[in-house]
Amino acid sequence: MNTLTIFRREVEQYFTTPFAWLIAAAVLLLTGLLFNQNLSQAARGATIVDPAFIPSVFSFALVFFAPLLTMRLLAEERREGTMELLLTSPVDEGSIVLGKFLGAWFYFTLLLALTLVYQIILLSISQPDIGHSLCAYIGIWLYGGATLAVGTLFSALTENQIVSAFLSMIALMLLWLGDSVGQVIANLEVARFVRTLTLQGHYSTSFAAGLFRGEDVAFYAGIIVVLLFLTMRLVASNRWR
Amino acid sequence: MNNRPIVITRSRVAQFGSIVGGAALLIGIIGFIWQGSLTSFVIVTLAVGVAGLGLWAVLNPQEFTGFITGRQVRYGTVTLFSTLLLIGIVALVYTQLQRSTVTLDMTQNQRFSLSTETLGVLRRVTRDIQITGFYTSRNLTTRELDDQFFRLYEDATDGRIRRVYIDPEENPAQASRFGVQQDAQVYISYLNTDGTEVDFNTLARVPRSGAQERDMTDAISRLLIAGTVKIYFEQSLGERDPLDTTSEGLSGIHNGVQESGLVTAALNLAGLAASGGDIPADAATVIFARPLRGLSEAEIGVIDRYLQRGGALLLMADVLYTDDAFLGESDLFNQYLWERYGIRALDAVVVDTASSGTTALDVVSAAVYTDNDIGARLAPDEGISTLFRVARAVDVNIDSAPPNIANGRVIMSSPLSFGETNLATLGATNQFTFDEGQDLPGPLTTVVWSFHQQTQAKIVLVGDSDFATNGLALSPQGNGILFTDSVAWLTNLSERIQFSPQAFSANLPLIFVSQQQLDLITFVTIILLPGATIVSGLAIWARRMRQ
Amino acid sequence: MIEVKGLTKRYGDRLAVDHLSFTAKPGEVLGLLGPNGAGKTTTMRMLTGYLPPTEGSASIAGYDILEDSMEARRRVGYLPERVPLYPDMTVRGYVTFWARLRGIRSPRKHVNAALERVHLMDRQNQLVRNLSKGLRQRLGLAQALVHNPAVIILDEPTIGIDPQQVIEVRESVRALGKEHTVLFSTHILSEAEHVCDRVLIINKGRVIAQGKPADLRRQMEPKTQLYVVVGGASGKAARQLLSAIPGVLAVERDGDGYSLTVEGDRDLRGEVSSHVMQAGYTLLEIRQATTSLEDIFLEIVGKSR
Ligand SMILES: Nc1ncnc2c1ncn2[C@@H]1O[C@H](COP(=O)(O)OP(=O)(O)O)[C@@H](O)[C@H]1O
Ligand SMILES: [Mg+2]
């Protein structure tokens, strides 16, 4: 109930401030440019249109995009002093964190849904592998949730939005670097283990290839749950520090 | 004045003890988790940790108890432990899901699902098989993708097929044992009876082409029939030597046959005929690689008994300029083949006046019949053709075939070729002209097959033997394919590994789009959509600002 | 309604609130009066559950702020020192949001009532960012009372707004006191005098005086001061003369003259002048210093320093 109230305020905030719209436009422009490039290449017969193309663009873009979405979530509340009111209202910290996180995820979901337009275009001019695309979209949706959870955590760590965004970008960059782990770590088994701890390690060779695996869902869901729990404790730490 | 430092030292020491102790305890615990056992390093750090905290407790008991029972510590530890518990639960769920392979293949061409054909093959796996992949860490993603796929084999066989990955750089000794030449090579083999070590006699490299499933399933099928299919090379009639490594020898195809998991052996037909023996029952195919003489009646009898049992022959009949040539026109065996199987060799050399080779005697396949598997991969228009150096024309009686016989052509020469029948002149002077009425008009058949529907006997007759030698077997490509697919058909290998073609078709999404459409798409996606987003955002914002 | 026992807050080595104890009865406006840094905000933050006390306990409407934090919070409306706002919400949206979070399922009526109360009804659709400072303060008030809480805690609600609006806010607080228990902090004495039923004067985290504003005044009255400058007498003679006057409790040298502490609220000016005349000296100046609560406050705070 309280979660829903906070969620609704969060979503309203996204739609009534120009910031969120500008981000949406930027994302559409970026994906649109890449899509057109890919499409004209494919039309000339050089490549095919990868069914996971748009989601895979997101897999990198989210490193920068998720912190922008989440940097204000808790940092702003603290700076504006509204956190004091939230914490003195009969609302548990879990609802606050969850409502805010879900708001950001919802916004991301809508944005992702907007890019389905490219899929519709493809559908009208060829026979794309819809199942494969759907799988990649599900994957990037969960992946996005995990990156937003990382951003939420860092938003709770500091009052300064810029610092929060910067820190979560660094963290996400490290988490993202899954596919290049092998270039750095020579030992295959270690590299493999490290890769299973990265975001890409559960996307690029499964969801993006059209394979839906339970363990990948568990990974992203696990990241979300653990990080939101930590965020919640962090917010609650006000009360007992 | 001298007393003061001593008093301070007491609480300082306590503080020092608390910091060092806490840090050491933390390092010790992390070390324990990292190394997984109580190494001496872990024990020492833990001991230092306990000692430090003990020092703190003794020297400043008030602060110590205050800290232990304080709210911070209570909430902090609760947070720490519940986070660890949560991570533990997530890890547990994760590994459970991973182990039980909860997956869903969402690709259209079912890239991550095994076809029923493959599952059929896997059902016959009774011995432990190991897929050994050699990947460096640089090829991590390839490995992960391959692993997704190999895992299907492991799951489908309840672990009878297992996956092992070796880093060739970490383990160069193993890599050279397997003969690894490049990154991401995959091998398949049986395990030894004790189930620990790879049985190197059965080791085969899995090719890496576009059709991943066919490559792997092929390899497994070959492994399954390994040791069960035996190929005999006839050796008593002056044939080419399967162990000869010169360009005239057959060592290449001989090794290839072995690498495919087939067993090879030599056959002494003359000896069998003399002793009244029989061709061994395990002979899946007998290869006659250019016998130099005609067969005796006794020898034909041995062959006939073999064919009656459902035997298979690969006959390579070259042009020979001797009187007692193998399959000469009046040769008994040639007559036997014509009467019983509707195929025979002709005493004519194929001369291709339009040959793309160095002389008109280089006969390139011009027409290929695909009603039999032998010809399936030999389409000349795909650039895969065979090259026979001095080819002999062969004949097939399709219209009035002997009873129970199905037969046909595989390869024919070009329409501009003819069959020079004057072998004596050709052999002596290497000259040929088309003599109306004497020579055979083209196109001419160079490879035929015959199948007895009741006895299941199979024969392939090739009017050449050079194509299988080390000099020509691999180049052009078609020569090797002709040999391989002939053996595959004769031994029924191709029936054992049978795929429906669409099971592996890549089915790439084709794009039909005009430049106009492309321009429209560009406009919509790059200008209209982002533009509309900005405009509606600004509109909403402006309206709100006025409130 | 509010019961505080030995409440203590330590920020590291700094003691912000030092064993504070007090109670506030229903329908009472209790003032927390103290200079900046006295610990008013810290006290309120502990009461609302935002900060944990280092020691001591407190309860709101019978619910312990630590053990039954949720229940206690349900019964509190809180306006922090700096009004926390969401600038991109409308006035109505803002109040509705907080009403929902305080557990009101269909907040329409509550929101209307609250907006009426702070006279923001006609601005309900305006954006918060476009409100003036005083209106924002009133909006903060609306948020604190929208769920009709038993206890309303207001942290210096009149700070930084213009005088007209200060009066309005004071009126609102007084009105609130009729139905709610109000804890109200300020560093302005006259404000406490006007608004509160009872005042706690705190400094450095400790209560140094408490009572009704009138009581506090009375407590102070024995210490009424009279300033006298006597001409023609030596210091010792003057002191002797002045001390002998009945009703004078103490004599202190103060600049050119003497400061007399007088018993009760008696006016001794006549007696002092006649005594001086009788002794043959001249009375150069006599002046009575009526003390206001302001003086009490300053004195108390000064002493506790
Ligand atoms: N978060 C904090 N950390 C450290 N000291 C603080 C903190 N908040 C307040 N203080 C100190 O505690 C004392 C009381 O502050 P506060 O309660 O804000 O006083 P008031 O509200 O009466 O002005 C002050 O000396 C202040 O410096
Ligand atoms: Mg304050």
Image (cartoon, coloured by chain):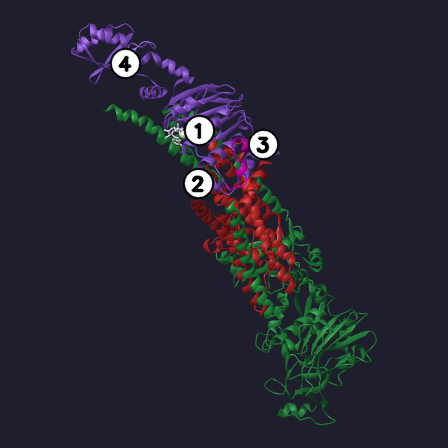
Q: SS of the residue at dot 1?
A: helix
Asked whether the residues under marks 4 and 1 belong to the same chain, the reply is yes
Amino acid type at circle 4 is Leu
| Foreground: disc 2 or disc 4 | 4
Q: Which residue is mark 2?
A: A159
> Image height check: is C130 above or below C4?
below
Q: Quadrant of residue B23?
A: top left
Q: Quadrant of ligand 1?
A: top left
- Mark 2–mark 4 Cα distance, whole angstroms, equals 56 Å
Q: Which residue is mark 1?
A: C167
Chain A colour as displayed? red
Q: Which residue is mark 4?
A: C226
> Image height check: is A38 above or below B55?
below
- Mark 3–mark 4 Cα distance, whole angstroms, equals 56 Å
Tell me which segment is drawn in magenta. C109-127
On the image, the x and y values in percent for residue C40 come to 41, 26
Contact check, label 4 and label 1, Cβ < 8 Å: no
Circle 3: is it few (<14), some (14-19), or many (20+) Cα within 10 Å? some
Contact check, label 2 and label 4, Cβ < 8 Å: no
- Mark 1–mark 3 Cα distance, whole angstroms, equals 25 Å
Q: Earlier in the sequence, mark 1 or mark 3?
A: 3
Chain C colour as displayed? purple
Q: Residue at x 80, y 75 (%)?
A: B405
Residue C119: in magenta span: yes
Chain B colour as displayed? green
- Mark 1–mark 2 Cα distance, whole angstroms, equals 35 Å
Q: Quadrant of residue C196?
A: top left
Decide if ligand 1 comes within 8 Å of the CB at mark 4: no
Asked whether the residues under marks 3 and 2 belong to the same chain, the reply is no
Q: Which residue is mark 3?
A: C110
Amino acid type at circle 2 is Glu
Q: SS of the residue at dot 4?
A: strand
